[in-house]
Image (cartoon, rainbow, N blue to C red):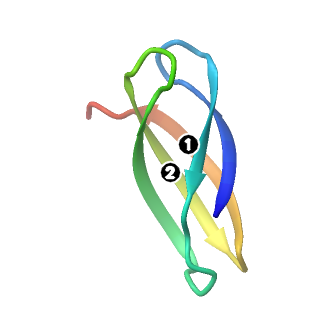
Amino acid sequence: MNYKFITCFFCFEEFEVSLEVDSSFAGNNTEIYDCEICCNPNKLDYEAFDGEISITHVSDGNE
């Protein structure tokens, strides 16, 4: 399990998300995480390659 900090799209507070990605997965993925502070949904786009995860974009999860 990978833990990453993201900044909320709505309140700009930082919170931690846990990303469960199989080590054999390579590519792009999108998930929705509710902010731990303001409870608004954040759409998280990320890439996974060779077990490493890079967050590419955080946006409005209400879309």
* Residue type at the position of mark 2: Asp
Q: Secondary structure at mark 2?
A: strand
Residue at 56%, 42% (x, y): give it: 57
Query: Farthest residue toward the left?
Result: 63
Residue at 71%, 75% (x, y): give it: 51
Question: What whole-number distance in Å separates the C-alpha atoms at marks 1 and 2?
Answer: 5 Å
**How many residues crowd mark 2 within 10 Å: few (<14), some (14–19), many (20+)?**
some
* Left or right position of 62 against 26: left
Residue tagged 1: 57
Towards the viewer: 57 or 25:
25
Image vertical order of residue 13 relative to residue 23, above or below: above
Towards the viewer: 39 or 51:
39
- Report the quarter where the N terminus lies: bottom right
Which quadrant of the figure has residue 16?
top right
* Residue type at the position of mark 1: His
Q: Are marks 1 and 2 in contact (CB under 8 Å)?
A: yes
Where is residue 2? Give x, y as percent.
67, 59
Q: In the rendering, which numbered label is found on residue 45?
A: 2
Residue at 46%, 63% (x, y): give it: 29
Which quadrant of the figure has residue 17?
top right
Q: In the rendering, which numbered label is found on residue 33?
A: none
Where is residue 13? Give x, y as percent.
62, 17
